[in-house]
Amino acid sequence: MILELMVSEIGFHLSGEKCFIWYGPHPTLIITDPKMIKGITFKHTIFRRPPLSPLDRFLIVGLFSKDGDEWAKRRKIINPTFNHEKLKNMVPSMFISCRELVKKWDKLIQGKKSIEIDVWPDFANLTADVISRTAFGSSFEEGRQIFELQKELFSLIYQSKQTIYINGSRFFPTKRNRRLKQVFCEADAIMRDLIKKREERMLKDEVNSEDLLGLLLESNQNEMKKNGNNKSFGLTTDDVIEEFKLLYLAGQETTSNLLVWTMVMLGIHRDWQEKAREEVFQVFGSNNELHELEAEGLNRLKILTMILNEVLRIFPPAINIRRSTQETTKIGDIIVPSGAGVLINLPLVHHHPELWVDDVKEFNPERFSQGIGNATKKPNSYFPFSMGPRICIGQNFALNEVKIAFVLILRNFSFEVSPSYEHAPFPRFTIQPRFGAKMILRKLIK
């Protein structure tokens, strides 16, 4: 179902491993051949991101929108923020947010055999809370304010995209345009104030760099020091603001989607839910309530990792990878002229029967039991977080968060999809449940 939906949404039917479509006024090559996909994603200096629309520039900024030297500079500075050791230090903050969600569901179910709940809004709030805590530490209340403003900004832009766009119409003094600019400026002002205060405290050695903001500012300062305190080698305050706006958009929505689709799949395939629960009890114990969680334990959750890999195959975080050529170049046996577009549709590749060992229409985490390489017939057929130099920098952050959430959920509840649940994956910026995700929750008796 999801495959047909994706094909319908972008308006073409695939024939073979490649075809041309018109993406608006631009000729675009659709690619599903893994070898060609690797060539495109690894040649990031030739295949660059297409220019953003004026509306998108309000929202999709930071590393995602950059190319060339500017992208390389930002990636170099941001990379240390998301290394393995730094992410381990964020596990306690993630744990606190996930535990709050479990406590909320505990209160709702108290005295009842079961409850019906739409988990989609709760997961959206959870991921926003996790980003606010991990990004801003003790200032996470201000982080929540930023999230609410970013959420409204996204909604306003999405509404604008549903109408015919007239060049320059964003400057019209309409109610929506005025509110869009107001929200943008409010979020900008809060983040600017947070950054200023943090930099002042760092100069006085009054703060440890344990949250994402502190780590990024520290990495930025180190990079400038390496180059004789030359500010051109570092990020400006506006650059840092852009990166945190991107973090809220990409990190919050994609992670909440992974949470909700994992919950739905485990609610449908309850045999896999039981297997995952047994593994969680085996790794973290079953008798006592968890008051903390060791990061090393997350790496031992092999079954849960297989489940997440399968969910990411079916519902990848992004729908398309779009690129445009900067020069006439050859892809396989095709000559692509300069300025032409290239589109890689992840659901098409992840659901292509000729690329996978087992039935692609089935939910089967077992296909990943021997690793990703053995699940596919051809290398580079699985790339939920993209691949190559521009692979998603926050993928391990997201996977840690989802694993922590399901460690606590599986220890405390059994669940199944509600009879009122309607399976309707909806492609927006990401693949979302159009009518929510209503689940039946039951408290486990230990």
Image: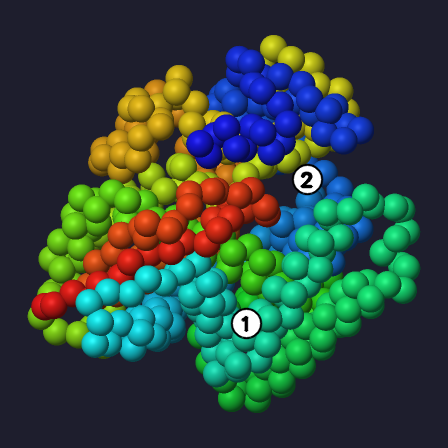
Q: Dot 1 surroundings within 10 Å: few (below 14), some, or many (20 or more)? A: many
Query: Which label number is shown at residue 440?
Result: none
Which picture quadrant has residue 156? bottom right
Q: Position of residue 429 (x, y in %)?
A: 59, 47
On the image, numbered disc 2 is attached to which residue? 49
Query: Disc 2, disc 1: CB below 8 Å?
Result: no
Q: How is the image coloured?
A: rainbow
Q: Which badge, 2 or 1, is on the more N-terminal residue?
A: 2
**Circle 1 residue:** 213
Q: Vertically, is 45 above or below 31? A: below
Nearer to us in this view, 164 or 398: 164
Q: How many marks?
A: 2
Q: Residue at x 47, y 78 (%)?
A: 137
User: Is 160 situated above or below 188?
Assistant: above
* Front residue (pair 407, 426): 426
Element under disc 1:
helix
Left or right for 246, reference 359: right
Quarter the N terminus occupies: top left
Residue pictured at 33% horizontal, 39% vertical: 310
- Which one is nearer the viewer's eye here, 112 or 227? 112
| Amino acid type, callout 1 | Leu
Name of the residue lying farthest toward the top: 333
- The percent coordinates of residue 357 (x first, y second) are 30, 22
- Tell me where residue 444 sits by quadrant: bottom left
The secondary structure type at the circle numbered 2 is loop
